[in-house]
Image (cartoon, rainbow, N blue to C red):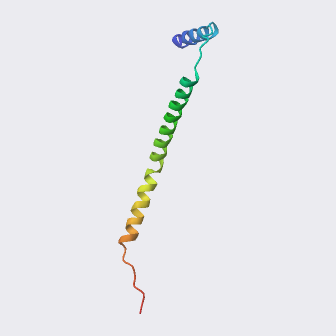
Amino acid sequence: MKTVMSFVIAVSLTIGFGQDAYAYIGPGAGLSMVGAVWGLLVAVLAAFGFLLFWPFRKMFKRTSANAETEPQEKPAP
């Protein structure tokens, strides 16, 4: 418990007494950063979507393969 309290105090002091950085991100670097974050976000969401829908795709393929292999009744002449 003592280490957690000292961590909270250290973080509070760091945030409370920090100075401004006066940083500037130019338009080229800003657009590059936005593009990289956007690409990473889309890749993670696509991977999550593929993992989420993979069982449904397998089930659909299995049911459609079973439907093709079942014999079709011929109509009576």
Picture layout, residue 43 above or below residue 14: below
At 59% from the left and 16% from the top, the residue drawn is: 24
Tell me where residue 53 appears, x and y as whole percent.
Answer: 47, 50
Tell me where residue 46 appears, x and y as whole percent.
Answer: 48, 43
At 44% from the left and 60% from the top, the residue drawn is: 60
Tell me where residue 76 appears, x and y as whole percent.
Answer: 42, 90
Q: Quadrant for residue 12, please give it.
A: top right
Q: Nearer the viewer, residue 31 or 77?
A: 31
Picture layout, residue 52 above or below residue 25: below
The quarter of the rendered structure image containing the C terminus is bottom left
Q: Nearer the viewer, residue 64 or 5?
A: 64
- Which residue, as the protein is rendered here, is positioned at the far front? 28
Figure label count: 0
At 56% from the left and 9% from the top, the residue drawn is: 10
At 58% from the left and 24% from the top, the residue drawn is: 27
- Which residue, as the protein is rendered here, is positioned at the far bottom? 77
Picture layout, residue 50 above or below residue 38: below
Picture layout, residue 55 above or below residue 2: below
Tell me where residue 14 appears, x and y as whole percent.
Answer: 59, 9
